[in-house]
Image (cartoon, coloured by chain):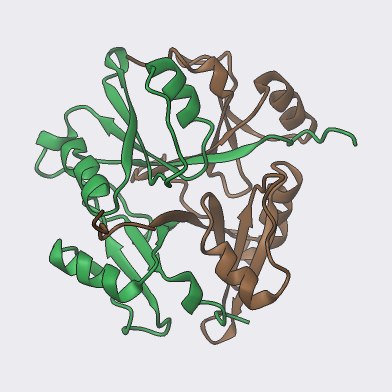
Chain colours: A green, B brown
Amino acid sequence: MSLKPHDGFVFNHTMLRIKNPVVSVDFYEQVFGMTLLRKLDFPEMSFSLYFLAKLGESDTPPTDEGERTQWTFSQRGVLELTHNWGTESDADFKYHDGNAQPQGFGHICFAVPDLNRAVAWFDEKGLDYVKRPDQGKMKNVAFVKDPDGYWIEIVQPDLLGGLGR
Amino acid sequence: MSLKPHDGFVFNHTMLRIKNPVVSVDFYEQVFGMTLLRKLDFPEMSFSLYFLAKLGESDTPPTDEGERTQWTFSQRGVLELTHNWGTESDADFKYHDGNAQPQGFGHICFAVPDLNRAVAWFDEKGLDYVKRPDQGKMKNVAFVKDPDGYWIEIVQPDLLGGLGR
């Protein structure tokens, strides 16, 4: 069997810029149960990177820092948050969510085992909604906002078997 | 052990709007070896969704359409491309990459087993670079562009153990 040029490629992560890492890392940890795998600081360029993943039971990230960095870059489904130092103390600073004009990036999405229970959890945490499951044309799909206003889609996979044509 | 509200959550996908699905789906299939898991059409809203993933050897998506949709929404590391019908025939139409102002979304990233071999492959396919591995301050990291100009970071995990502080 011949080796293909893209054998072993892994869709590793999606990067979003965030205004305040204290707020955003806490949000993804507390609300979505993600784990901060690595924080990488680049003082000469005045930014830090936060790599988070929603680990499954069988995921065992190494404890050694270098090995853990390699492991982080080898996984699927990692979220990289970029913090350019200082934005958190600028009251007027705001990132662009990609859904207002000019459009491009749309959202990230989490699958959940039970949409109603997830919505109750998000309500308990006081999240802002773009749309609740019963609003709009696409039922059984919710959109919440993260601290920077990025949209997070929430779906329950076994409710979506009949989606689209 | 008590159940946590975010148990079973999965970071499923990242959505990017694309101008032309023929060009973009071909790009992600041919260059990155991704598989188009599902195409979902919404004629009443004049858009289509394309869900792609870079499958591993142990991934076995179901063939039944409904089951395959559910399976797609249950995975990590899926890329959703949204096509609003008609944009492909508007010569002036262009999506925003998130790195020009106003900034927000930054990039997606693929891990590759061999960065040099990947770069040779991208050169063979004629890809545009944001930066080659030997340019800029971050060595061993490349950025290429997808057909809409979205940035795709390319990393070889075992070269990055010493990244950052």
Q: Which residue is pictured at 16% across the width and 37% down the height?
A: A22
Q: Closest to the observer: B13 or A37?
A: A37
Residue furthest to the front in view is: B1
Asked if residue A136 is positioned above or below residue A85 in the image, the reply reads: below
In the rendered image, residue A24, in percent from the top left (x then y), is placed at: 22, 44
Relative to A121, is A41 on the left or the right?
right
Asked if residue A114 is positioned above or below residue B30 in the image, the reply reads: below
Q: Which residue is pictured at 80% across the width and 30% down the height?
A: B124
Residue A159 visible, this angle: yes
Residue A131 visible, this angle: no
Labels in figure, total: 0
Asked if residue B59 is positioned above or below residue B38 in the image, the reply reads: above
Q: Which residue is pictured at 15% across the width and 61% down the height?
A: A125
Q: Closest to the observer: A144 or A159?
A: A159
In the rendered image, residue B107, in percent from the top left (x then y), is placed at: 47, 40
Q: Closest to the observer: A126 or B22?
A: A126
Q: Closest to the observer: B24 or B8?
A: B8
Relative to A117, is B143 on the left or the right?
right
Q: In which quarter of the image is the N terminus of chain A?
A: top right
In the rendered image, residue A128, in percent from the top left (x then y), is placed at: 20, 65
Q: Which residue is pictured at 56% across the width and 78% down the height?
A: A161
Choose top left, top right, bottom left or bottom right for residue A151. Answer: bottom left
